[in-house]
Amino acid sequence: MTTDLRIGVLGYGLRGSIARTAHRPGRGAVVTAVADPDPRARADAAEAFPGARTTAHPAAVTGDPDVDAVLVLTPDHTHADLARRTLLARKPVFVEKPLAITVDGCDAILRTARATGTRLYVGHNMRHMPVVRLMRELIGAGAIGRVRTVWIRHFVGYGGDWYFKDWHAERRHTTGLLLQKAAHDIDVLHWLAGSYTEDVQAMGDLMVYGENPHRRAPGEPKTEDWYTEDGHWPPHTQRGLNPVIDVEDVSLLNLRLAGGVLAAYQQCHFTPDYWRNYTVIGDAGRLENFGDGPGAEVRVWNARRSGY
């Protein structure tokens, strides 16, 4: 008979899908407690996880003897405190990326995990994406030789909906959208290239959403139609933006990795399409992904040719 891992959840907002995926009663894991300060979120959690206890207080989850492990799915600026509290309670913790919004916050979490001997996992879910795993397998098989340079383009097509209508738009809560979004890609870059970044050159700017005057009043909640797949385009038609917007909507990075690989990363939040494109060039070929979801493909060139 399977004994389910009893999961506690801190934060049931946009990342609540992670908790719903983990919830498999009778098949290995069950959500038993959820904490969120928003009554609407608690009501949604009660519907998603029948029998789970809901509360406004994180300590009621981290201190619950009926919780074996905890998912931290709260806004980024709360991760450092909540992850440390969970680790001090000797409960294994999954922290949605980024781990924290400052180096000091990340270091504090890591020190606590080591001091308590408690498991810590950062939610870099792109490592599990089929297209990323395929690229890594091809590189490992020698399809393009030794990796020498990597170019990444990140088209954030719903950026105005997802990142400029709530706390994501404020630097004090995120440090910047480069951290919020590029955390995925820089992790994958290091994974594909086999070494970590040593030198960085970067620039960015608030080029489009800063000019949009249609902001909510401070304290005013997001509108019910804050996100639509076919609306809110082009960006200047957006309404109900966050009262404060002080993060970049375009960012560019050049990086030199310890193993000698040169890399580039670009991120844009006002493009119409939503996907990531990786070009990895080795000393015996190159590969590139087209699409990053179902139906995506990876093409390999390891002989000379003109065009695609």
Image (tube, helix red, strand yellow):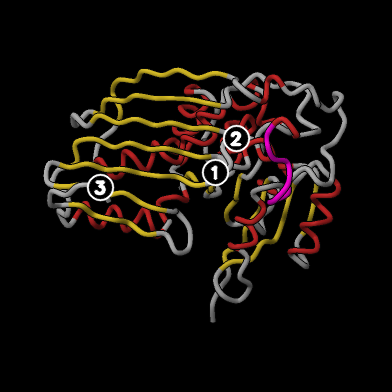
The quadrant holding residue 43 is: bottom right
**Going by the image, does 28 lie left or right of 78?**
left
Q: Secondary structure at mark 3?
A: loop
Rendered view: 87 above or below 290: above
- Residue sitting at 54 percent across and 31 percent down? 100
- The residue to which callout 2 is attached is 79
Mark number displayed over residue 103:
none
**Going by the image, does 123 lie left or right of 170?**
left
Task: Say what amino acid the circle numbered 3 marks.
Answer: Gly
Mark 1 nearby-residue class (10 Å; few <14, some 14–19, many ≥20):
many
- Residue sitting at 54 percent across and 46 percent down? 274
Disc 2 or 1, which lies upstream in sequence?
2
- The residue to which callout 3 is attached is 307
In terms of depth relative to the viewer, which is nearer, 229 or 193? 229
Q: Secondary structure at mark 2?
A: helix
Measured Cα–Cα span from mark 2 to mark 3 = 46 Å
> Depth-wise, is mark 2 or mark 3 nearer the camera?
3
Task: Say what amino acid the circle numbered 2 marks.
Answer: His
- Residue sitting at 60 percent across and 27 percent down? 174
- The residue to which callout 1 is attached is 95
Labelled pair 3, 1 in contact (Cβ < 8 Å): no
Rendered view: 285 above or below 4: above
Labelled pair 2, 1 in contact (Cβ < 8 Å): yes
**Going by the image, does 225 lie left or right of 168?**
right
User: What is the span of residues highlighted in magenta in the rendered image?
Assistant: 228-235
